[in-house]
Image (spheres, rainbow, N blue to C red):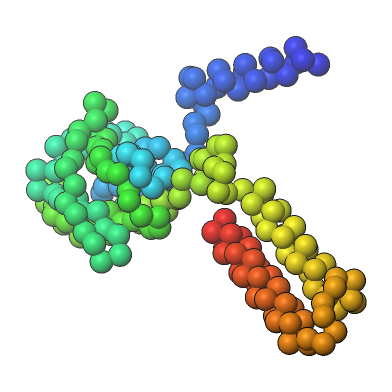
Amino acid sequence: MIVVKIAIFSFIALLFSIGIIVPSFAHTSIEVGQYDIEVGWEIEPPVVGIRNDIILKITEPGETQGSYKGVTSVFKNLEAIIMYGGATKNIDINSDPRPGYYFLPIIPTKTGTYFLELKGEINGTILDVQIPIEDVESTSVLDFPLSSSEGPADLSALKNAISSLQQDVSKLKSGETFTSSNDGAAYDFAVFGLSIAAAAIILAVIALVKRK
């Protein structure tokens, strides 16, 4: 059985290596005139604070039907602008050794959706488009192991603290825990204090869950 599994995985790896199977990436493609433009991140998923490249592939129909060829020297009259919310930045364009491929170096500093705006022209074809790129994720998608301030252990500890407080309140109400019978205010204050502590821990649990 092990030999069979090894053979299967080896065969799949071979298919990847010769290009019969290619990995699936979340790239966006649009058509402008005769040109096909594909945009996406080089490293996926894109993570905030980690250097990455926006990959740009521009092709046009080849000499034979159904074939395509890369378009070179595209950015003579074309500029690329990266957009996030209301912020924009002109990005330096670098040519890839492969014809029609270009890359734009960037370190994304916020999570969320980025857009690439292309303005200008390619051999007389006017471009003025905004292309969405795959959302940038927080480092939590890659973090391992979890830091001491994160993870299921924290949530479990908070839940245990709430359970302990609830037991203390029950003991006060049942009389198991001693309070002066002549001082009802002390009892009320104790219950009130424990209730506030429990509420604070519950809010902490909610914040922790939302953060994840």
Q: Can residue 57 be seen in this view?
A: no
- The location of residue 181, given as percent across then percent down, is 85, 84
Q: Would residue 166 appear left or right of 120 to someone viewing this image?
A: right
**Image height of 18 relative to 183, above or below:** above
Q: In what quadrant of the picture does the N terminus appear? A: top right
Q: How many labels does the image show?
A: 0
Q: Where is residue 69 in the image (x, y as percent from the top left)?
A: 28, 34
Residue 50 in sight: yes
Instruction: Out of 68 and 183, give the one closest to the viewer.
Output: 183
Image position of 74 (left or right of 12): left
- Classify residue 143 as left or right of residue 169: left
Quadrant of the image occupied by residue 2 = top right
Residue that appears at 47% across and 24% down: 19
Residue, far left:
76
Give the x, y percent position of residue 132: 35, 56
Q: Nearer the viewer, residue 161 or 210?
A: 161
In the image, residue 86 above or below residue 141: below
Q: Residue at x 74, y 78 (%)?
A: 191
Figure check: 183 above or below 107 = below
Dividing the picture into quarters, in which one does residue 186 lie?
Answer: bottom right
The residue under the point 51% across, 46% down is 140
Quarter of the image with the C terminus is bottom right
Question: Splitting the image into 4 quarters, where does residue 190 fall?
Answer: bottom right
- Between 80 and 181, which is closer to the camera in this rendering? 181
Most distant residue in the top direction: 3
Question: Which residue is at 82% across, 67% downward?
Answer: 167
Relative horizontal placement of residue 39, taking residue 186 as reference (left or right): left
Task: Out of 198 and 61, give the one closest to the viewer.
Answer: 198
Q: Is residue 9 above or below residue 208?
A: above
Q: Position of residue 189 (x, y in %)?
A: 70, 81
